[in-house]
Image (cartoon, coloured by chain):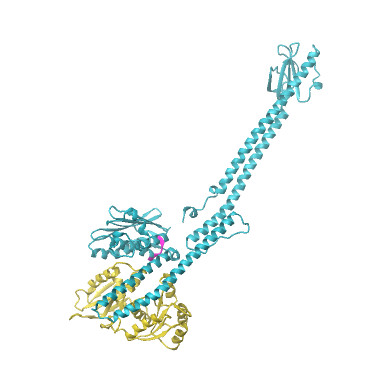
Amino acid sequence: MPLSAEGRNIRMPFMDILVVDDDEETRRHVTNGLVSGGHQVSEAADAASALKLVSSRHFDAIILDRLLPDGDGITLLQQLRQRSDPTPVLMLTAVADVDARVEGIEAGADDYLVKPFAFVELRARLLAIRRRGAQVDLPAAVVRVADLTLDVLSRTVQRADTAIPLQPREFLLLEYLMRHCDQVVTRTMLLQNVWKYDFDPQTSIVETHMSRLRAKVDRGFASGELIETVRGEGYLLRSTPLVKTTNE
Amino acid sequence: MSEISASRVSLLRSAAFRLAVVQAAIFALIVSVLFFITWWSVGAYVEQRVHEIATDGLKKLTRILDASPGADHIEAERDLDENQHYGLFDANGRYLEGDIRIPVSGETNVRTPLGGRGAALVPLHVASGRIADGRRLVVGMDRRKADVLLGRFRRAFLTGGATGIAAALVVGFLTARRYLRRVEQIAAVAAQIDDGRLDTRLTVTDRRDEIDRLSAALNATWQRTESLVEGMRQLSTDVAHELRTPLAHLRFRLEKTRANLDAHSPARAVMDQSLNDVDRVLAVFRALLRISQIQSRQRRAGFETLDLSQLVSAVTADFGPLFEDEGRAVRLYVQNRIHIFGDRTLLEQLLVNLIENALRHTSQGTSVSVGLTQNGAVAELTVSDSGTGIPESQRERVLQRLVRLDTARTSPGMGLGLALVKAIADLHEATLELGDAQPGLCVTIRLPRAA
C-alpha cells in the first residue's frame, strides 16, 4: 500500500535512489516509503560507505543528510561535484536557518529539506529535482501542456484558442505547475519557488490564489480539468486531463 | 544604537576639555586674587615709603631753613638725595628757587617739569609746608622708580597668569584629544558589538591607566556576553537537533500508521489530528529559532538597498484575494520609490505577519489599510484595521513571545507573529508602535531610509 494517493493515475517514474543518513529510523522510513512506491533504494549510514557506493554505480538521485558521523554531508557533496557527478542531491538537515540552506545549495545540492518532513514532501521534491537533473537546456520561453500554452516573454496564456488573462502571481503559479506537470507540487514548494518566501504564512494564501487560477484555467473548457488537488499532498497539473465521468 | 555612539563627540564638547577649561578658569581666579592681594600690600608699602621720603625731606629742609632764618639758599644737593626735589616760594606763592616751580599746598601727586619750561614731566609725590618766616617750601619725591617697580610687578603677574591659563588650555586640549580618541575607540568597538560582531575587542595598552582598566573590564563583559550568546545559540541548535530526531521519528510512525488505516476509520482522524499537533509543535519551534536567529543580528550581513514601495505594494496586492473572499478589502496607500537598506525576505515576512494579523483578528466587514509614506529620513509603514484593537495596557505584552490576549484565543495563531515583527523591526533599527486607529489597531513601523 503506497503512502498516498499516488496510485490515482499518476505514474511516478522508477528511480534508483541512494539514502545517506546515520539515523536508522529516518533511513528506514524513507526507504520503506520509496520502496512501496516502486523505487529501488540503497542505504548508507556514513560518508565513507556512501562515497564507495557512488563511485561504483549510478543513482538517479541521492538523499543526503547534512550531518554524518564521519564528516559533513556538504563535504561529501563537494567531492561528488568536483568529479563532475551530476546526480541530483536532496539535502536533509535538522538546521532550518537560511545560512545552512544557502550553504547547501552553493555546495551543489538541488534542494533542501528540513527534518522532520512529511513523506509526500520528500517524494514531491525528489521527483522535481530528478527532472531538473535531466533538464540540461535553459527553460523554454514557451511552455505547452495539453491544450494550454504559456509564453514567458509576452506573459500570455492560452487554452485551446482562448486567451486567459492572469494576475502576475497566478501567472507565476501556472508557469511553475506547467514546468512540473504530472508531478505533485506541495504548498511549501510553491511558497519557496513562486512566492520566494522562506517562511510559512498562516493564512490560505496559496489556496486562494490556486482556486482563482483554477477558476480561470479550468472552468468552462470542454477538454477537462488540468489542475487537480491531491488531498494531503498538494497540487497537480496533468498533461492528460481527467474528464470527469462517474464518481471519483 | 544610541545617539552618543552614533555621532562623534566634538573635541570642544568633550568632558576632558571642559574640565581643562574649568581648571584654567580656577587658575585665572587664583592668579587674580593673588595679584590683587600682593598689589594692594606692595602698593600700600610703596606709597608709604614715598610719603615718608617726601615728608622726611620736608622736615629736614624746614629744620635747616628755620635754623638759619633769612638764608635764601639751600644746599639741596647736600641735604637731599637724588630722588628728592624741592621748590621754595614766598608767602604769596611766587617762585624763589629749586627744581619744583609749582607752589603746591598739602600733600599730593603731581606731574611737573623739573628745572623749568621745556623739561620732561616727572611724576612727583610732594609734601609742602610753611617755614617760620612764612615762605612756602615744597619737597617732592620722584615716583618714577616706584612706578617702574609697580609696572613690572603688574606685567609679571599678567604675563605669568596669561601663560599659565594658555598652558592649562593647551594641556587640557591635548589631554582631551588623547582621551577622546580612546573613548571613540571604545564607542566604535561597542557599536560593532551592537551590530552583531560579538568577537570584537578593545586593545589594552601597557600603560595600565584608567582607560585600560575600563577597556579590560568591558572586554571581560563582552567576552562573557559572547560566550553566553554563543552558548545560547549552541543550546538552541543542540535542542533543535535533539528534539527534531525524536519528533521526526514520531512523525514518521504516525504517518506510517495513518497510511495503513482505512480511509473512513475513526483512528485515521485521530492520526490526522496527531500529525497536525506534531506539525504545530515543529512550527512553534521553527518560529522561536527564527526569532533567536534574527535577534543575533547575523542576518544583517545579507542586507541590500531595496525598493520598499514595490515590496509593500506586491505583498499587499497578493493578499487582496484573501480579503475579497471574505467580502472585504485591503486598501493600499503607497508613496513611490522609498528605498531602505534591509533584508527582503524578512521585510516581506514582517508585512505578511501584520496583514495576516489584521485579517485573522478582525471580524468580517472590517476594513484593513496598508500605508507607506516618507517622512524626512524615515519610511513610515502602517497597517491598520477597524477591529477591536488592543487595550493600551496590553500593547507592550503582545510583543513578547508566546503571548496571546484572551480575546484573541479563538483565532488561530501561535502568538509569535508580533514578537517576530518586533525582532525584524529591531534588526532594521526601526521602531514599532502599536496605536489606536479609533476604532481598531494601528501598527506603525518607522524605518531609516537608505541614503
Residue B261: x percent and y percent? 27, 81
Vertical relation: A34 (above or below) B238: below
Residue B90: x percent and y percent? 73, 12
Q: Looking at this view, is B348 or B297 the one in front?
A: B297
Residue in the image at 32% along x and 85% along y? A36
Q: Looking at this view, is B281 or B315 the one in front?
A: B281
Left or right: B316 as drawn, with respect to B424? left
**Picture quarter with the N terminus of chain A:** bottom left
Q: Looking at this view, is B5 or B403 the one in front?
A: B403
- The number of numbered badges drawn on the structure is 0
Q: Quadrant of residue B285?
A: bottom left
Residue A108: x percent and y percent? 43, 77
Tell me if residue A114 can be seen: no
Left or right: B244 as drawn, with respect to B322? right
Vertical relation: A178 (above or below) B111: below
Is residue B230 located in the magenta-colored stretch of the structure? no
Residue in the image at 55% along x and 57% along y? B185
Chain whose colour in the figure is cyan: B
Q: Quadrant of residue B254?
A: bottom left
Left or right: A80 as drawn, with respect to B373? right
**Picture quarter with the C terminus of chain A:** bottom left
Q: Quadrant of residue A163?
A: bottom left
Q: Which residues are magenta?
A: B340-345
Chain A rendering hue: yellow
Tell me if residue B224 can be seen: yes
Is residue B342 located in the magenta-colored stretch of the structure? yes
Q: Residue furthest bottom?
A: A56
